[in-house]
Image (spheres, grey):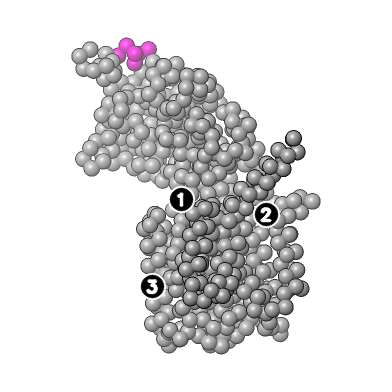
Amino acid sequence: MPDAILKAADITKEFGGITALKDLSFAVQEGAIHAIIGPNGAGKTTLINVLSGFLPPDTGTISLNNQVITGQKSHDIAKLGIGRTFQNAEIFGNMSVLENVMVGRHTRTSAGLFSSALTLPRARREEKQIRDHALSCLETVGLLDLAAVAAASIPIGNQRLLEVARALASEPRVLLLDEPAAGLNTQETRMLAELIRSIQQRGITVIIVEHDMELVMDISDDILVINFGEKIAVGSPAEIQANPEVIAVYLGEEG
Amino acid sequence: MRFVRNYSSLLLFVLLLAGIPFFVEDPYFLSILVFVGIYSIATMGLNLLMGYAGQISLGHAAFYAIGAYTSGILTSQYNVNFFLSGGCAIALAVVVAYIIGIPCLRLKGHYLAMGTLAFGEIVYIFLNATVDFTGGPSGIAAIPEFRVGEFFFDSDLKFYILVWCIFILLFVVTRNIVHSRMGRALRSLHGSEQAASAMGVNVADLKVKVFVLSAAYAALAGVLYAHFVTFISPQTSDLMFSIRLVTMVVVGGMGHLWGCVLGSAILTVLPEMLSYFEDYDMLIYGCILLGMVMFLPGGLTRGAEMLYAKCVKKAGKRGDA
């Protein structure tokens, strides 16, 4: 497929004899919203960790834009354009909301210890750009009012949005969202769906791991279903909903 | 104007420092303030490591010792120029910190504390054992006083000015770092290493960098100490001193630059004042520290901030009524 931005081929990952991912292959189309679903323990978060470089796969290759990125460190992969959020909202609790997002600019800026220490004009200009860009990201997710607030003190729903804003600040080409709707109420989830669509409209490819099926079916272009680390099915929301194997996995084997 | 606003607290502090010598006649008191300055420099570096990046070190006395001994030996035995000896001292500390930091900073929490503690003990034993080189347990005496050309820093007042000028310079530099891209990256390590890594922060590399930087601060403080006291022995930089530095950071306020001055001042002045109680001084000292950590876990600076916020709030309420 020429227009796949992210490709995974034969990914296997074991943890002490337990196979979390087994010969998993899939491709994500550029500009799509691609959901990964599966029962608890299916290996979804492991997959996100492998794609973002937090875990090296035992075998297999991952390529971003036809460039093999397997084995690269997570911070290098971030630089290459894969942003991510975490299942349990890993915000920087010791910083303000704005500062959290400003950290997101890290890969797109370059001021080092030395130029920062002397506040060289270049560092000062860059600092202003970081701030402006971070504010615009906060505006995108609707947290601009909370910019100066301590990040640890905002509710979980906002923390998830903050994580998205922080990831957006790094201008990723692919954004991995790990259960962004967990802990959100219905209205917040609806707003999240809007937000994800607007991110897609910016040309960012979104990969989302989510348990909220209504949300997944609503926003996804493609869905990958995995169970016990293996691919069960892949297709459009309509195809997935009609797939007997998927139904069996979700409802039990009798069906 | 922006300069005044950004540096208002620093300007006030400079005025205070400049005023003190006019009111204080007692050279003993001035020498205590010199020590406060020296410790403030060391704790400022340690605060970057502990308060900002969230990594503990129980071995910073070793870098202090490396600074003091290197400059002490070079100037007293080899007649090396002060700037060169100071530079060598800091450079050596930087190299050692780099070599130690790479394996040590892979450790976390208690393990990192143990690792750095072990390093500190190794340096302490080394200083005691290499008698020909460091004078062993009896240390090195007759270290020359600091001088620039023909100008000798031979009084407490002159050294007071020197130390605090260096402090202020470093304070400005450190403050810039803290409020920069790199400063935020440091604090992000404290917040969540995982998320920092996902934002492109090279976690392992940055930890080593800040460790090296904080070692340089400690070494500089050690250099100043050696040329102020003109005598050093391994006792000046034992494990207790490492712990004292950590305590200064914690009592002053982790992650707050002014905390290093407050913490250093309290932990230097308090024991002097408590010597009045003679045998009970350590007991009272311990109780005071325990009380501070229990009731002001954020340190004195946070406590002061909270108090200030309360006062403002009260004043605001009164204004409304």
Q: Chain of mark 3?
A: B
Q: Are marks 1 and 3 in contact (CB under 8 Å)?
A: no
CA distance separating discs 1 and 3: 27 Å
* Earlier-in-chain disc, 1 versus 3: 3
Q: How would you classify the magenta stretch by its main secondary structure? A: helix
- Inspect this view and state whether residue A245 appears: no
CA distance separating discs 2 and 3: 40 Å
The kind of secondary structure element at disc 2 is loop
Instruction: Write the residue at 38% across / 63% down.
Output: B115
**Is the C terminus of chain A in the top left, top right, bottom left or bottom right quadrant?**
top left
Closer to viewer: mark 1 or mark 2: 1
Q: Characterize the local packing of mark 2: few (<14), some (14-19) or many (20 or more) Cα atoms within 10 angstroms.
A: few
Q: On the rendered structure, is A23 left or right of B236?
A: left
Q: Is residue A242 magenta?
A: yes
Q: Chain of mark 1?
A: B
Query: Which residue sits furthest right?
Result: B1
CA distance separating discs 1 and 2: 25 Å
Residue range of the region highlighted in magenta in the rendering: A238-243
In the rendered view, tell whether residue B33 sits above or below residue B56.
Answer: below
Q: Amino acid at mark 2?
A: Leu
Q: On the rendered structure, is B67 left or right of B100?
A: right
Q: Characterize the local packing of mark 3: few (<14), some (14-19) or many (20 or more) Cα atoms within 10 angstroms.
A: some
**Which residue, given by chain and number where applicable, does mark 1 sit on?**
B203
**Which residue, given by chain and number where applicable, does mark 2 sit on?**
A120
- The residue nearer to you, when weighing B272 against A27, is B272
Residue B320 location (% of width, % of height) = 74, 35
Instruction: Write the residue at 58% across / 72% down.
Output: B273
**Which residue, given by chain and number where applicable, does mark 3 sit on?**
B122
